[in-house]
Image (cartoon, rainbow, N blue to C red):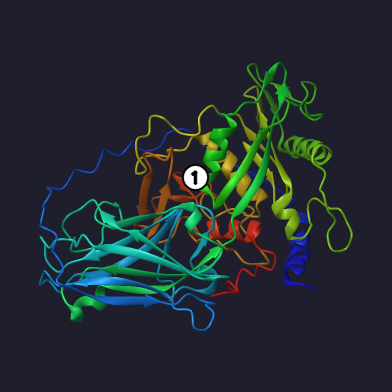
Amino acid sequence: MNIAISNFQKFAVILTVAIMTACGGGSSGGGGTPATPTTPTTPTTPTPPVATGSTTRSVTPAGLPMGVPGCSMEQKLGGFTDGSLEIKDATWLQVVGQKVDDSAAAASDKTLLAAGKEARIRVDVTAAGTGTALPADAKLQLAWADPGGVTCEEFTMTSASAAAPTSVDYRTLDKSYVATIPADKLKEGTISYQIVVHAADSAAAGKLYRQGRVGVAPAITDKIVIYPITFDGQTGSLPSTAEIKRLILRTMPHADVTVTMAPAVTLTTLTKANGVNRGSYYEFTDDQMKSAVSDLATKCGIDYPVPMANESGEIDPSWGPWPLRSKVERCFGIYPSNVRFTEHEGLGQLANRVLLAPSFSSTDNLSVSGPYGSDWLSRGALVMLHEYGHILGLGHAKCGTTEYLDSWDGNYRLYGSGRLGSVAMGFDTRDGITPYYFADTTGTEFADMMSYCRKKWTSDRGFRAIIDYLGYYDYDPRGGYPWL
Ligand SMILES: [Zn+2]
């Protein structure tokens, strides 16, 4: 009997009480005033130094066969005298921010990247005083063991600022070194890294050098089928399947997701006779909402039968072992605007296959021009992502609700505040051209996607929980990751 199965058994008991997780009541609209762009600082343009020497820095990846050398890189030295420059902080950015140095983190908070998905690194170098040039030579090297030996990949880190700041400004990326790591350079396993910045001399070189290891989870994928629901002449609708795919890649750890559109369906529960006519729409109760989800679950099970049995020989779309979690199609029912439910907008079966969510026409609020105003994702997109979080095993984050709080094997995995953490960073690739970077430096500005509070984004804890759900067989939420 392995851990994963026993987790499921315990979880199944919880679910007999609360098999569905209802969401998203009441409050709508409003929101803050869109932030005006930050006033640009007066550019100072100190001249980058020219090195007079260098020192070799080496890193050895985990699992490297005996006798195979690791990866090396030159750290440039000299050409300037300011020995106060130092790496103050470094963060991986892949949907969420996660510490490069996670040595002080609890096992369940260890940094975990997802393979096959573009990531960035943010490296903050500060100086004691103003006007010190940020050296131009700053690099990241990733190293991993391959069956044939070792692979070393070098990435140039660049900064939009010519001068080193005197303290870390988490609200912007413009004063940090940033390097982009393409999706195909992040492979599952343990990757060793070294960060090297040109230093004044050998005495100062250590402050501009970091090395360590980071865990990279398997590439996360999923299959989603959209079922538009027809009621009284209207049919639910979403932006294009390409937009829905992009929305999921922007907000979740997925490397890939297939989104297909099924023909429109009618659900047995959603009839005019069952609803209350409110003029422009029919209102249904939350119990009817649960029935509608069950109707769709039946349809989903017929259209996409589960292809394999669990270890007991049972075919159970709800409670199969890990391969079922990662291989079943998940069915999203989208209802039209002439349908409303008394208390909730969306409903997702917890750790299962089916959700119900309202129609929406755009993934983004086009009137919001940056991440520091109100929600830049549309309300409909946020409801759908929240319900999707439920079917990937997440309960609620404790902000705006205390109902159906996240609980996996008895552990609440999200932040106690229901927000993103005390110094949280996020990165939305958006259209791939104009991404949004943001940070919550107060722990109160942004909220977890799984909460009922405003200005939502995925928390790093939620991000890892989704990786755990879709990526691992024997995941133990308190045990950390086997290779670290
Ligand atoms: Zn919910």
Give the quadrant of the N terminus: bottom right
Residue 70 in the figure: left or right of residue 385: left
What amino acid is found at the position of numbered circle 1 in the picture? Arg
Between 133 and 232, the one lying in front of the other is 133
Q: Position of residue 267 (x, y in %)?
A: 78, 29
Residue identifier under label 1: 250
Q: Position of residue 284 (x, y in %)?
A: 71, 30
Dot 1: what SS? helix
Q: Quadrant of residue 75?
A: bottom left
The answer to whether residue 407 shows anywhere in this view is no
Residue 149 in the figure: left or right of residue 333: left
Give the quadrant of the C terminus: bottom right
Q: Position of residue 10 (x, y in %)?
A: 76, 65
Q: Relative to 26, does residue 470 appear above or below in the rendering?
A: below
At 38% across and 66% down in the image, what residue appears? 141
At 58% across and 54% down in the image, what residue appears? 402
The answer to whether residue 108 shows anywhere in this view is yes
Q: Relative to 456, does residue 473 appear above or below in the rendering?
A: below
Residue lying furthest bottom? 66
Residue 288 in the figure: left or right of residue 86: right
Between 37 and 194, the one lying in front of the other is 194
Task: Say few, some or many: other residues with alpha carbon within 10 Å of mark 1 (under 14 / 14 to 19 / 20 or more).
Answer: many
Q: Relative to 124, does residue 221 appear above or below in the rendering?
A: above
Residue lying furthest right? 313
At 16% across and 77% down in the image, what residue appears? 201
Q: Relative to 332, does residue 135 appear above or below in the rendering?
A: below
Residue 136 in the figure: left or right of residue 81: right
Between 12 and 181, the one lying in front of the other is 181
Q: Position of residue 62 (x, y in %)?
A: 51, 76
